[in-house]
Image: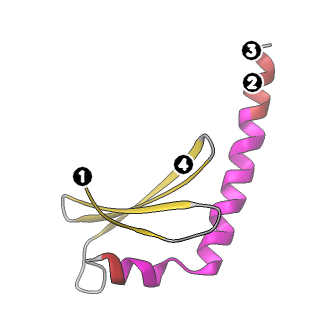
């Protein structure tokens, strides 16, 4: 897996990788990460084309998933105390 770049965002670390004819998006915040894999195509094959896909709607959904992940994390952490 090779890092092809990062997409700037004030709250998230968004990294874009290339591996085995796939473009991989990794969103990170705190202890959590989400990874999305897409087949490489003529329309999606480099950092510029990947950047176009990262819309505000997608980022809103990413944050919603992180919120859900955090709720699960807190429940599991409570079991450890």
Up-down: is 13 above or below 45?
Answer: above
Up-down: is 5 above or below 26?
Answer: below
When asked about the image quadrant of residue 81, the answer is top right
Residue at left 43%, top 79%?
51
Front one among 53 and 4: 4
Mark 1 / mark 3, whichever is N-terminal: 1
Mark 3 / mark 4, whichever is N-terminal: 4
Residue identifier under label 2: 77
Marks 4/2: CA distance? 17 Å
Number of the label disc, if any, that sits on residue 1 = 1
Marks 1/4: CA distance? 17 Å
Instruction: Find the magenta span and give its range.
Output: 49-73
Residue identifier under label 4: 33
| CB atoms of marks 3 and 2 within 8 Å | yes
Residue identifier under label 3: 80
Does the magenta portion include 70? Answer: yes
Give the image location of residue 60, x and y in percent: 68, 70
Give the image location of residue 73, x and y in percent: 71, 34
**Dot 1: what SS?**
loop
Marks 3/2: CA distance? 5 Å
Mark 1 / mark 4, whichever is N-terminal: 1
Give the image location of residue 26, x and y in percent: 45, 57
Marks 2/1: CA distance? 32 Å
Mark 4 / mark 2, whichever is N-terminal: 4
**Dot 4: what SS?**
strand
């Amino acid at each position: 897996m090779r890092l092809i770049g990062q997409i700037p965002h004030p709250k998230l670390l968004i990294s874009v990788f290339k591996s085995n004819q796939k473009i991989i998006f990794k969103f990170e915040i705190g202890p959590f990460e989400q990874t999305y894999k897409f087949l490489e195509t003529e329309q999606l094959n480099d950092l510029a084309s990947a950047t176009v896909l990262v819309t505000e709607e997608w980022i809103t959904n990413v944050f919603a998933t992180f919120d859900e992940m955090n709720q699960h994390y807190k429940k599991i952490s409570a079991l450890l105390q």
